Image (cartoon, rainbow, N blue to C red):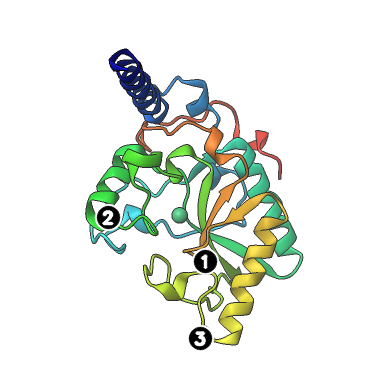
Amino acid sequence: MHALRLLWLVLLSLLIAACAVVQRPVRSPDHPAVRELVDLRRSDPSLRFDVRYATTGNFTRERLYPVPAVWLHRDAAEALLRVQRDLRSEGLGLKIFDGYRPYHVQQRMWNLIRDERYVSNPAKNAGRHTRGTAVDVTLVDRQGRELSMPTAFDDFTESAHRNAAGIPARAKANSLRLEQAMARHGFIPYPYEWWHFDYRGWEQHPPLDVSLTGLSQPKSASDVAR
Ligand SMILES: [Zn+2]
């Protein structure tokens, strides 16, 4: 009985150790997973950007990014450009708030919020944006004006949930339009934030911890399909 208990404890320890290994972020800029990231700002001039985390105008009131950079895994970037192409044919476009987020920034956000509905707990799943497969976006018209949405970006209230009640009809319709445009090209809508989408298969990508200034374009941006 004692031996069995010991074996069980050993197995449990091994399982915990294995989980810890899986969650450890990649820190080498030369790692293949890091080299899959592409610079979205160099991929399609019609995309709009508002990288709040590179300013103090975000929920933390701190400048979290040294540069207003948006990088995504190549597959997610290509899919996002297909979404943009669809939207442009309807007189709309995407404005991007965030893409790849280094693990140490994810940790800093978690320390400030500590609510798993709104910020991934790095100790549990190492985050979503850290994999380069998550993107925060909204819709804009041809002039770049944001369409009305259920809440502002990074409004951590229940009104930002996709099933929120009492949302004005136009905002609800715009949010659904964004959701459908993204889902058509493989993005999975996150239930608690109307602006957040994960590219399919995101869990299979490792979390990364290379700073935004430590990334370099491995190939030309034109490699990303337009
Ligand atoms: Zn997000």
Residue 174, image quadrant = bottom right
- On screen, residue 60 versus residue 197, left or right, reads left
- On screen, residue 160 versus residue 188, left or right, reads left
Q: Earlier in the sequence, mark 1 or mark 3?
A: 3
How far apart are labels 1 and 3 at the CA level? Answer: 15 Å
Going by the numbered disc 2, the residue's amino acid type is Arg
Quarter for ligand 1?
bottom left
Tell me the number on the disc at residue 114. 2
How far apart are labels 2 and 3 at the CA level? Answer: 27 Å
Check the image and name the residue furthest to the front: 1
Residue 66 in view in this figure: no
Residue shown at 51%/81% (left/top)?
165
Residue 120 in view in this figure: yes
Check the image and name the residue furthest to the right: 89
To which residue does mark 3 refer? 166
Look at the picture and state if 222 lies above or below 6. below
Residue 152, image quadrant = bottom left
For numbered disc 1, what is the local secondary structure? loop
Going by the numbered disc 1, the residue's amino acid type is Trp
Going by the numbered disc 3, the residue's amino acid type is Gly
To which residue does mark 1 refer? 194
